[in-house]
Image: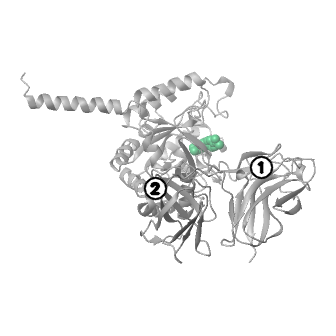
């Protein structure tokens, strides 16, 4: 058969494109993740149909754990599939919802711990196509719709916990633990389904594994090898287990107090549950979400925020409205988030910062009352400062490493107004060396214990506790302070003279009740005796803190002062210090 020269050239070009595409995906594609900064999580399964209610009883907390909390027999729970018919689901609408939220990627539960596959699986008949009246695979349509919107698409897959299967992890109310054969579960369901997801839904941005178990490091490496073989560019979450994975997922609803290097993700629910809960209206506001997004970016990570559609496939109205507001803000201010790196300065009384090459983005959550935005540790040279929203140039004065920007009386965005500082020279990383900036320009200052320099036995620890089941909170506290040498030390820069009320926010268990401590600020000290907040600690109960007002200090002139908190005498642990509160006296 004769090939014209044109045909040969076309074939050559096509082969070249295929080859380069294969080469391009020869290893995990991390750049999109680093730049994305914001993703949407969707938890959607049979639990969404139940909405955390079972046999007339309402449960509170994570709805996707209902089967476990109510110890519903697997055979009984499986009957819910016959009622699951998400006629309100519309892949194009969902993809548009994610796009208009300003998120750059979507991760959706392909199979959660209930064991039900929200995709057409040939591995198990317990799936949305075979076991429900819906008889369709929503994931195929959703994956395609997301790609058409320019979004990265990924699957959450619970690779070990599976309450439907005798050999899956977690269901010991139907299937005795000592009879479980985890390797069989992986061989017969988990890994084959993961391969289905990696083979049938197009290029995936990531696979979000969760709750690892039943695999040693070598077997986990084998699983990772399968992902790499089928989708070389696909990223893998750290919850694949055994300290492996391409990016680190923090604990549920955990914002780290400080910068974390490398690729990582903070994951939060929009209300108090991952899965849909009929009674849960505790939604984060647009301002809450924007502050969380900016703070996560300031620390160098991504925020993935979860929404939980109901059993009909409807995303809660509040989630739709609030995430649309977030998206509108990102349309105007997105360059201060997307593609940024961590802030060179710690959180400030006015907000947080993000950085992109020679531009520092100042996210103003609270306007200083005197209109002066003080930017500490600014070691570069400010060339100009403008409001991102409208390009309005602002007056900026730099004295050494202190940059002061004069703000207009009204800021464009009450939730988060961004000032862009364009600079030359090198902006040093001063996250840990910058003192706490205290002044009369704000009503209150909150200094996290996580900022402390510790001495002696003092330790800083992130303590997880929960309100409702699965509604996790994380508080970094200064602990094990037993002698005067065990201190939590800080540096406060008072910009204004005046009086300031000092309070401590801490938890005090029974062993620490009535312990005497002291906070020293410069040459002044405030002594205190601890107040009991709880007899003991259980991570499945709320960790209660008290805000204990210690007294007023007088600052005669501006300046940097050392601050130290420690026991007055040797004895039991003083308390679990979460933060110092400083309030200017009007
Ligand atoms: C897991 C799931 O059990 C939960 O239903 C949800 O899917 C969430 C995103 O992931 O929950 C976890 C997993 C890990 C921690 C806490 C909750 N952790 O490491 O603290």
Mark 1 close to ligand 1, CB under 8 Å:
no
Question: Which image quarter: residue 183?
Answer: top right
Q: Write down the residue under mark 2.
A: 314
Q: Element under label 1?
A: strand
Q: Earlier in the sequence, mark 2 or mark 1?
A: 2
Q: Nearer the viewer, residue 154 or 125?
A: 154
Residue at (69% x, 57% y) in the render: 435
Q: Nearer the viewer, residue 349 or 90?
A: 349
Residue 299 image position (x, y, % from top left) = 58, 50
Which mark is drawn over residue 478?
A: 1
Measure the alpha-carbon separation of dots 2 and 1: 44 Å
Q: Is residue 5 visible?
A: yes
Q: Element under label 2?
A: loop
Tell me if mark 1 has few (under 14), some (14-19) or many (20+) residues whose alpha carbon lies within 10 angstroms of its own: many
Residue 259 image position (x, y, % from top left) = 60, 48
Q: In screen coordinates, is 86 left or right of 243?
A: left
Q: In the image, is residue 296 above or below residue 404?
A: above
Q: Is residue 101 visible?
A: no
Which mark is drawn over residue 359?
A: none
From the image, which quarter does the C terminus lie in? Answer: bottom right
Question: Which image quarter: residue 295?
Answer: bottom right
Tell which quarter ligand 1 is in: top right
Q: In screen coordinates, is 441 left or right of 536?
A: left
Residue at (65% x, 53% y) in the render: 60
Tell me if mark 2 has few (under 14), some (14-19) or many (20+) residues whose alpha carbon lies within 10 angstroms of its own: some
Total of numbered circles in the picture?
Answer: 2
Residue 54 image position (x, y, % from top left) = 61, 49
């Amino acid at each position: 058969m004769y090939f014209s020269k044109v045909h040969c050239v076309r074939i050559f070009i096509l082969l070249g494109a295929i080859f380069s595409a294969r080469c391009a995906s020869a290893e995990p594609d991390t750049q999109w993740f680093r730049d994305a900064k914001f993703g949407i999580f969707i938890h959607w399964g049979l639990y969404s149909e139940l909405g955390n209610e079972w046999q007339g009883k309402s449960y509170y907390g994570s709805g996707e754990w209902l089967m476990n909390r109510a110890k519903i027999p697997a055979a009984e729970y499986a009957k819910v599939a016959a009622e699951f018919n998400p006629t309100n689901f519309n892949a194009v609408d969902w993809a548009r919802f994610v796009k208009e939220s300003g998120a750059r990627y979507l991760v959706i539960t392909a199979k959660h711990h209930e064991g039900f596959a929200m995709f057409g699986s040939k591995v198990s008949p317990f799936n949305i196509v075979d076991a429900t009246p819906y008889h369709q695979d929503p994931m195929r349509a959703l994956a395609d719709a997301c790609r058409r919107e320019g979004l990265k698409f990924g699957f959450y897959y619970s690779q070990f916990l599976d309450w439907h299967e005798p050999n899956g992890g977690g269901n010991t109310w139907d299937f005795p633990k000592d009879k479980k054969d985890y390797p069989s579960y992986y061989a017969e369901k988990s890994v084959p389904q993961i391969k289905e997801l990696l083979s049938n839904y197009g290029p995936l941005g990531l696979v979000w594994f969760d709750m690892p178990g039943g695999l040693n490091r070598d077997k986990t490496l084998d699983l990772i090898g399968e992902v790499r073989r089928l989708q070389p560019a696909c990223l893998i979450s750290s919850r694949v287990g055994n300290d492996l994975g391409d990016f680190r997922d923090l604990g549920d609803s955990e914002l780290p107090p400080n910068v974390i290097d490398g690729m990582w993700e903070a994951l939060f629910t929009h209300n108090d549950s991952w899965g849909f809960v009929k009674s849960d209206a505790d939604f984060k506001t647009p301002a809450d979400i924007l502050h969380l997004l900016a703070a996560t970016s300031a620390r160098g990570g991504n925020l993935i925020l979860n929404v939980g559609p109901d059993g009909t496939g409807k995303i809660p109205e509040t989630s739709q409205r609030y995430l649309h507001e977030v998206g509108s803000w990102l349309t105007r201010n997105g360059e201060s988030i997307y593609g940024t790196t961590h802030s060179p300065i710690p959180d400030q009384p006015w907000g947080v910062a993000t950085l992109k090459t020679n531009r520092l983005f100042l996210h103003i959550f609270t306007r200083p009352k005197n209109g002066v935005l003080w930017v500490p540790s600014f070691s570069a040279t400010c060339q100009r400062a403008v409001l991102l929203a409208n390009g309005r140039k602002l007056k900026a004065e730099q004295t050494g490493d202190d940059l002061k920007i004069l703000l207009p009386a009204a800021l464009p965005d009450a939730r988060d107004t961004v000032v862009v500082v364009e600079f030359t020279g090198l902006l040093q990383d001063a996250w840990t060396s910058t003192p706490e900036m205290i002044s009369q320009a704000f009503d209150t200052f909150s200094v996290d214990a996580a900022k402390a320099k510790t001495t002696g036995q003092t330790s800083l620890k992130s303590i997880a506790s929960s309100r409702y089941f699965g509604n996790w909170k994380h508080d970094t506290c200064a602990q094990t302070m037993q002698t005067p040498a065990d201190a939590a030390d800080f540096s406060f820069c008072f910009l204004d003279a005046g009086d300031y009320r000092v309070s401590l926010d801490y938890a005090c268990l029974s062993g620490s009740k009535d312990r005497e401590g002291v906070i020293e600020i410069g040459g002044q000290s405030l002594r205190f005796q601890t107040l009991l907040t709880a007899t003991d600690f259980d991570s499945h109960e709320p960790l209660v803190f008290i805000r204990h007002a210690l007294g007023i200090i007088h600052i005669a002139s501006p300046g940097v002062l050392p601050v130290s908190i420690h026991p007055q005498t040797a004895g039991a642990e003083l308390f679990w210090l979460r933060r110092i509160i400083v309030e200017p006296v009007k």
